[in-house]
Image (spheres, helix red, strand yellow):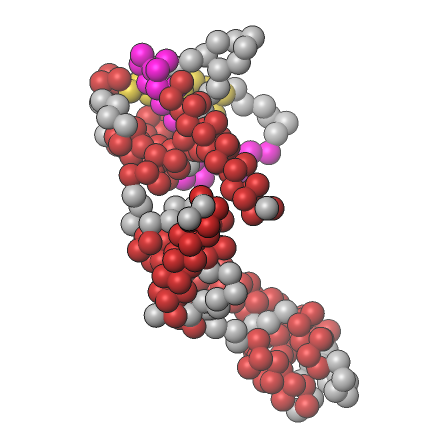
Amino acid sequence: MTTETSRYADFESLREQAIALRREGLSRRQIRDRIHVDNNDMLNRLLEGEPPPEWTKRPNAKDDLRDRARALRAQGWTYDRIQAELGCSKSSISLWVRDLPKPERKRTREEASEIAKRGWESTMRRREEEREAAKRAAAEEIGAMSERELFLLGVGLYWAEGTKDKPHARRERVTFVNSDPRMIRVFAAWLDLLGIEPARRRYWVMIHETGDVSGAERYWGSLVGAAPSAFGKTTLKRHNPRTNRKNVNAEYHGCLVIRILGSADLYRRIEGAWCGIVGAVSISSTEIQT
């Protein structure tokens, strides 16, 4: 059997397994873990043409809303009143009922304005519910994370938010800066995975001078579980009275800088791993085209 024939046979065997698992009702994530395929492009090829199970599909309430909107319009309701009742946008209502007769307006401008306001508030609530539902569904799809996945995620995270070495400015040291506590938690978990001892981690807070400086220092210290001795002097950003700052509430804690001592080798490993990720993506793209 030739090498090409062998590869084709392996692919077909994997595809049969993937399709069988899909028809059992498994999600993409579950299939990937079951057959040990880490490449999403390869998984797409294995499942090509196979529809997802019903439980992974988001319910579509548009048809029901359309029918209710048409029924209300037929009773003489205005767009504003329908919007307030159903919580859908006026543009959708217009599209659904434009073939129906236009009712005679019987309200004052003030009454119509109040109804429109309630309708917009209802629409905003519905949109927020849809937004949160989409986030929850995406979060549930992730499931447990393997050490390899955390490693790759940490490399990408660092390459997006960490300092980089330049030919004109050698900086082969690991320094990560971010204001999102969730991002800091993931990066700290990544350092734990790599075996970077707490004694090698140094921290600095960077915050606007009008913020709660001492509160920010306590916040970040508690988040990363570090003693005050692990922190350097806080950097204050001077206030420009001509700017209209938005980050002024109690949730504002500035940015945390994490620097790893003696990290030249770690930096080189990160850069090398990032090059490997880019190369792997390029290879996957070539496979799809061929």
Q: Name which quarter of the figure residue 285 lies in.
A: top right
The answer to which of 190 and 252 lies nearer the viewer is 190
Q: Residue at x 22, y 18 (%)?
A: 199
Q: Residue at x 49, y 49 (%)?
A: 41
Q: Position of residue 247 (x, y in %)?
A: 49, 36
Going by the picture, which residue comes out furthest to the front? 1
Q: Measured along the vertical axis of the image, is residue 167 above or below residue 10?
A: above
Task: Give percent across and percent down for residue 145.
Answer: 31, 45
Residue placed at 52% from the left, 19% from the top?
Answer: 238
- Viewer-proximal residue among 38 and 194: 38
Residue, far bottom: 75
Is 263 situated above or below 77?
above
Coordinates of residue 14 in the picture (x, y in percent): 39, 56
Residue 63 in percent (x, y) is at 58, 80
Residue 173 seen by the camera: yes
Quick check: is 162 in the magenta stretch? no
Q: Nearer the viewer, residue 266 or 199?
A: 266
- In the rendered structure, which segment of residues is drawn in magenta? 244-267
- In this view of the protein, which residue sits in the foreground, 57 or 123? 57
- For the question of whether residue 140 can be seen, the reply is no
Identify which residue is drawn at 39% across, 37% down: 153
